[in-house]
């Protein structure tokens, strides 16, 4: 019987610098992070449409690229947890239901609406067909957990959830509820998780799409005057207080540097300002 070692052609030992080997490993990991589909996505998605920052929504619709300081490690952690949860849910479905029946759709793609005549698609973390509910996983730090526990989701998250629900309803699947599972990134158990749900509000999704379409229409009209007109108009738009993305666009105000990830808010796209 051949052993696994005999079956595999291994590179032979030659010796070398451990530090150089570790540097090479880091390069491999960083390349994977910066070249994953999430990092390379340029078209606006459901997670960005609900931002209260007119400036950043218009910049995204205009196709502006955001500056990224360093390797986005925290979103990578979130992506890895999402992949594990997808495997868990599918294994549960396979073990619980016959092959021709499924309760859950994990990472199912749905078209949530149109902006400027173009379809906007997104991947829903989970659709529970039995309950009629979408579920969005959020892998977050303590600050966001505390805010969710006290005040519920930010508007960005609410819009995202209702856009997904709208998309599935439009596709013929009944969805009456939206849910967000805030899963602790730093805690040692799931006891700190926040499980939130609410009735689906289609109006919230439609209003967000209408706002985005209004901005897109203005951008289209200004584009006939040239890039300078577009840039000037985007720069004149209101910026939301505490916006995480404003400093990451080329027209960031003087004196503001592009931020690194703020613990607890790295997946929000906005540092929430919450009224007492």
Image (cartoon, rainbow, N blue to C red):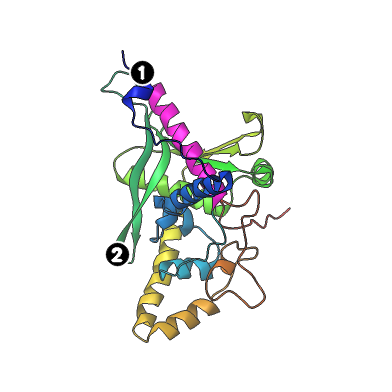
Q: Which residue does the image show at 48% across and 66% down from the upper left?
A: 57
Chief SS of the magenta region: helix
Residue 225 higher or lower than 255, as above or below: below
Q: Which residue does the image show at 64% across and 28% down from the upper left?
A: 189
In terms of depth relative to the viewer, which is nearer, 243 or 152?
Answer: 243
Percent position (x, y) of residue 181? 55, 37
Q: Which residue is mark 2?
A: 117
Near mark 1 (Cα within 10 A), the count class, few <14, some 14-19 or many ≥20, is few
For mark 2, give the secondary structure: loop
* Sequence-first disc among 1 and 2: 1
How far, Cα to Cα, is label 1 from label 2? Answer: 59 Å
Magenta-highlighted residues: 72-93
Q: Which residue does the image show at 65% across and 42% down from the upper left?
A: 145
Percent position (x, y) of residue 88? 44, 27
Percent position (x, y) of residue 146? 69, 43
Q: Name the outermost residue toward the left.
A: 100
- Quarter assignment of residue 105: top left
In the shown orientation, is residue 54 left or right of residue 41? right
Dots 1 and 2: beta carbons under 8 Å? no
Q: Is residue 178 visible?
A: no
Q: Which mark is residue 3?
A: 1
Residue 221 higher or lower than 179, as above or below: below
Q: Is residue 251 visible?
A: yes
> How many marks overall?
2
State yes or no: residue 87 in magenta: yes
């Amino acid at each position: 019987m051949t052993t696994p070692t005999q079956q595999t052609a291994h590179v032979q030992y030659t010796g070398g610098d451990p530090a150089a080997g570790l540097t090479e490993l880091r390069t491999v990991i960083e390349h994977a992070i910066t070249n994953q589909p999430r990092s390379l996505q340029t078209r606006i998605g459901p997670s960005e449409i609900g931002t209260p920052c007119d400036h950043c929504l218009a910049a995204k619709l205009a196709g502006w690229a955001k500056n990224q300081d360093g390797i986005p490690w925290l979103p990578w952690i979130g992506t890895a947890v999402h992949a594990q949860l997808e495997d868990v849910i599918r294994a549960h479905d396979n073990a619980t239901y016959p092959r021709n029946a499924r309760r859950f759709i994990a990472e199912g793609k749905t078209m949530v609406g149109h902006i400027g005549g173009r379809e906007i698609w997104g991947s829903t973390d989970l659709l529970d067909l039995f309950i009629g509910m979408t579920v969005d996983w959020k892998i977050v730090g303590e600050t966001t957990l505390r805010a969710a526990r006290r005040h519920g989701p930010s508007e960005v998250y609410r819009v995202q959830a209702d856009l997904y629900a709208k998309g599935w309803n439009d596709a013929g699947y009944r969805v009456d509820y939206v849910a967000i599972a805030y899963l602790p990134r730093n805690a040692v158990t799931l006891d700190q998780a926040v499980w939130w749900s609410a009735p689906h509000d289609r109006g919230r999704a439609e209003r967000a799409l209408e706002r985005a379409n209004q901005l897109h229409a203005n951008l289209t009209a200004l584009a006939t005057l040239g890039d300078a007109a577009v840039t000037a108009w985007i720069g004149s738009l209101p910026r939301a207080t505490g916006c995480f993305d404003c400093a990451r666009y080329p027209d960031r105000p003087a004196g503001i540097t592009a931020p690194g990830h703020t613990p607890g808010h790295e997946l929000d796209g906005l540092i929430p300002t919450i009224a007492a």
